[in-house]
Image (tube, grey):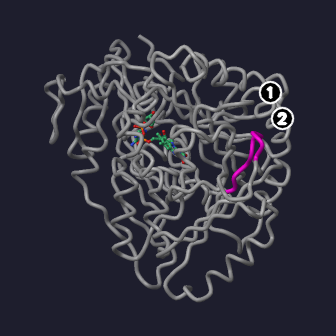
């Protein structure tokens, strides 16, 4: 590989970070790491390995910020491409003007969303759709979906991209949009890195708000909670962000890191007694600009008056747009300080159809997670009837479905209920209940061990997924860590 023409570096020594990820459970050492300075570096590497043909076992994994959970950005004895290096060597180009209908920023796929936010704000703009945590790369989230509390309105991040530049598994550099090379465009979005390495993306922008009214309220009753959530995501003029949490055991930093709220917890509101029961927290936000300053309180009050939460539990905070969007980073820093960020993360993310969410809650919160959880549990609905569903992302059949995220942290070497084995066994029970009660759930950030399971996951989309793999990465060189296809040698 030493004779590949490169602007950047191919290192056989600086490789150890590439065998780690946020999940902290899988570790595969690559043979080398490419630190690319140009798109041709990536294309030259892929071409080189492609031309070695099927007799070579070398694979390639693009690595964004390495925040996947189960080794998806790793390549055992292969080459990992450090996409952040590309991000650092390429500039962002803003395409914005007063009368432009679709303003966008042209960015490197190795760029972190937090950097895109800061740069866009200098122009008075910001991307429309986010993840809850912004220290992730564009390529990393676009390979999955990028879902957060704005997705009910704008769709996930994969629906807010106008153009991609992609290096396919044969080394070809292709520009694609919904009209040009659209098969590759839609394939790569949510495509788990299987058809190409995204090198640049045009991300949709909108004029940015300045401030955010950020609220949390509690419900004792799951039916009332979900009814309000569903009503909120169906009406246009409502809040700009809708999420929610299940609060099973409110003690401890690890359980609360996603619900910490200016050091206040609505569950500690005076007059509120949960009597040890599981409670549900609705998290909502309304964005506003300087000129709305006089009317925003009234607007928010009107919106809140339509909800049926437990009255004594309203917490309102006013923060800047950046503070709101970068909220999880604050919790990250607290956990980092205590050495609790780099622990194993056996996360389980499920998409549950609306018609099954009550049965799901009865089974999971009523029978499995009865008295404790090992981290935050997010729960909020989205409606895909306004989404572009031509992408590779797999969702339940019903238009409205819930994202339920069990964001567990495991205490290293614990054999108790906060240990890895116990949490994994609970995850298994949750997955089994989805199966036996026929809840028609789909995994988000999916992980399976066999191709048979992958086929089942993709359902009717499998044939297209397979066809695209054979077309764009015929030797199965790309992204082996997803464990969908194996390079045949
Ligand atoms: P990596 O982990 O580096 O890569 C992820 C996958 O994408 C790998 O298979 C990799 O090979 C592939 N890949 C990376 N770059 C490219 C590229 N340029 N082209 C093609 N394939 C590529 N997700 C949500 O949707 N919503 C959330 O609110 C959310 N919150 C999160 C909060 C935290 C604290 C964490 C750790 C994760 C969260 N996620 C969320 C999940 C996150 O979006 C995914 O794990 C994402 O893939 C991480 O991005 P990354 O840059 O770290 O990607």
Identity of the residue drawn at 50% across and 33% down: 471
User: Front-most of 98 and 432?
Assistant: 432
The spot of residue 355 in percent (x, y) is 86, 44
Q: What is the quadrant of the C terminus in the image? A: top left
Asked if the residues shown at circle 1 and circle 2 are in contact, with their CB atoms under 8 angstroms apart, the answer is yes
Q: Which residues are magenta?
A: 274-282
Cα separation between marks 1 and 2:
7 Å
Q: Which residue is found at the position 30% from the left and 62% from the top?
A: 92
Q: Residue furthest front?
A: 271
Residue 86, position in %: x, y? 26, 46
- Does label 1 or label 2 sit earlier along the sequence? 2
Q: Residues within 10 Å of mark 2 (few under 14, many from 20)?
A: few
Q: Nearer the viewer, residue 226 or 367?
A: 367
Q: Which mark is residue 197?
A: none
Residue 157 image point, x, y percent: 53, 54
Relative side of 375 to 98, left or right = right
Tell me: 122 left or right of 5: right
| Numbered label tally | 2
Q: Which residue is mark 2?
A: 362
Q: Which quadrant would residue 297 be assigned to in this image?
A: bottom right
Is residue 275 highlighted in magenta?
A: yes
Residue 420's x, y, as percent?
Answer: 54, 19
Q: Which quarter of the figure has residue 275?
A: top right
Under tag 2, what secondary structure?
helix
Which image quarter is the N terminus in?
A: top left
Residue where numbered disc 1 is placed: 367
């Amino acid at each position: 590989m030493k004779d590949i023409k490169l602007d950047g570096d191919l290192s056989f020594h600086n490789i150890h970070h590439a065998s780690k990820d946020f999940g902290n459970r899988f570790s595969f050492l690559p043979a080398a790491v490419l630190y690319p300075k140009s798109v041709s570096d990536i294309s030259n590497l892929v071409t080189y390995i492609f031309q070695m043909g099927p007799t070579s076992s070398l694979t390639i994994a693009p690595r964004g910020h390495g925040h996947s959970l189960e080794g998806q950005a790793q390549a055992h004895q292969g080459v990992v491409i450090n996409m952040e290096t590309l991000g650092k060597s390429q500039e962002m180009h803003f395409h914005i003007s007063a009368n432009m209908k679709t303003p966008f920023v042209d960015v490197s796929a190795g760029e972190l969303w937090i950097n895109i936010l800061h740069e866009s704000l200098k122009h008075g703009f910001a991307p429309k759709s986010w993840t809850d945590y912004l220290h992730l790369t564009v390529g990393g989230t676009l390979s999955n979906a990028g879902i957060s509390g704005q997705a009910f309105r704008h769709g996930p991040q994969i629906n807010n991209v106008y153009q991609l530049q992609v290096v396919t598994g044969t080394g070809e550099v292709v520009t694609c949009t919904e009209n040009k090379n659209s098969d590759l465009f839609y394939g790569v979005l949510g495509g788990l890195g299987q058809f190409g390495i995204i090198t640049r993306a045009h991300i949709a922008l909108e004029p940015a708000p300045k401030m955010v009214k950020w609220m949390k309220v509690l419900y004792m009753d799951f039916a009332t909670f979900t009814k309000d959530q569903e009503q909120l995501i169906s009406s246009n003029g409502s809040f700009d962000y809708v999420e929610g949490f299940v609060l099973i055991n409110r003690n401890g930093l690890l359980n609360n890191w996603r619900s910490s709220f200016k050091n206040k917890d609505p569950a500690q509101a005076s007059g509120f007694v949960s009597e040890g029961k599981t409670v549900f927290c609705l998290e909502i936000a309304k964005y506003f600009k300087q000129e709305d300053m006089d009317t925003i309180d009234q607007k928010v009050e009107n919106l809140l008056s339509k909800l049926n939460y437990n009255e004594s539990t309203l917490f309102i905070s006013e923060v800047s747009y950046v503070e709101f969007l970068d909220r999880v980073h604050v919790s990250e820093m607290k956990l980092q300080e205590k050495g609790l960020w780099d622990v194993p993360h056996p996360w389980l993310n499920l998409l549950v159809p609306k018609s099954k969410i009550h049965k799901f809650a009865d089974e999971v919160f009523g029978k499995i997670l009865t008295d404790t959880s090992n981290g935050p549990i997010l729960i909020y609905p989205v409606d895909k009837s306004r989404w572009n569903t031509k992408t590779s992302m797999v969702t339940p059949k019903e238009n409205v479905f819930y994202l339920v995220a069990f964001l567990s942290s495991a205490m290293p070497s614990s054999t108790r209920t906060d240990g890895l084995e116990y949490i994994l066994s609970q995850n298994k029970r949750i997955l089994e209940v989805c199966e036996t009660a026929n809840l028609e759930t789909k995994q988000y950030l999916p992980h399976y061990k066999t191709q048979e399971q992958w086929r089942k996951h993709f359902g009717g989309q499998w044939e297209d997924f397979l066809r695209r793999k054979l077309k764009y990465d015929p030797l199965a060189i790309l992204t082996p860590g997803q464990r969908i296809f194996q390079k045949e040698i």
